[in-house]
Image: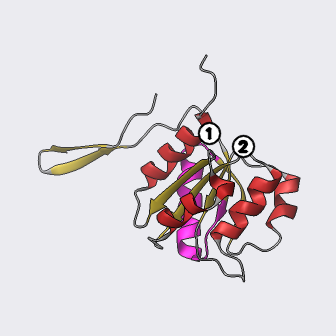
Amino acid sequence: MLVRNVSTVVKGRCKIHMDKPTSKRLKIMIIEDEEDILILYNDYLISRGHQVVIKSQSGNSIMTEIERETPDVYLIDYRLLSNTNGIDVAIEILNKFPSAAIVFITAYEPLSREIPKHPMFYEKKIEVLLKPVKLNLIENSMLELVNKNKPSG
């Protein structure tokens, strides 16, 4: 069970209760062009008990990295430091791993309208989150996508 952040004020001081790490440890790939955001996502997800297996600022040679260790979920920005974008990278991943869970995290608002236009994304585990986004929302989205269409038990 996930315990949310709770802030209480005791005698004028703010007391913060941290989330407990999640019980489901995910292997994650982060593809984000902005290094500071990449580091933020990495540090937060590791603190939550997940394993970040691949980090990249571009879409170059992603498949080689994935072949070494396949993630449970992919966090992908739309704009990348390469001649590819997040959609190109996601299509490459889905061609090899059709049931991959992909969370796009982007400030590029038109992406949420572009995704449904691509037949490759039909009935896939895809979510688009617009920046700025709360870190706990990223984690919740990942967990929901990974567990989508899985039998409970």
* Above or below, comparing residue 141 to residue 77 in the picture: above
Q: Is residue 13 left or right of residue 97?
A: left
Where residue 134 appears, as percent x and y from the top left, is 40, 57
Reply yes or no: does residue 35 show up in magenta: yes
Report crowding for label 2: few under 14, some 14 to 19, many 20 or more residues within 10 A (C-alpha). some
Q: Amino acid at mark 2?
A: Ser
Residues in magenta, as a range: 30-50
Q: Earlier in the sequence, mark 2 or mark 1?
A: 2
- Residue located at (69% from left, 61% from top): 90
- Residue located at (64% from left, 38% from top): 25
For marks 2 and 1, give the CA distance: 9 Å
Where residue 10 appears, as percent x and y from the top left, is 16, 43
* Quarter holding residue 93: bottom right
Secondary structure of residue under mark 2: loop
Where residue 21 appears, as percent x and y from the top left, is 52, 38
- Residue located at (63% from left, 22% from top): 151
The colour mode here is secondary structure
Q: Is residue 72 left or right of residue 68?
A: left
Label 2 vs label 1, nearer the camera = 2
- Residue located at (64% from left, 77% from top): 80
Quarter occupied by the C terminus:
top right
Q: Is residue 27 left or right of residue 127?
A: right
The residue to which callout 2 is attached is 99
* Above or below, comparing residue 132 to residue 22 in the picture: below
Q: Is residue 87 left or right of residue 137?
A: right
The residue to which callout 1 is attached is 146
* Quarter holding residue 150: top right
Q: Amino acid at mark 1?
A: Val
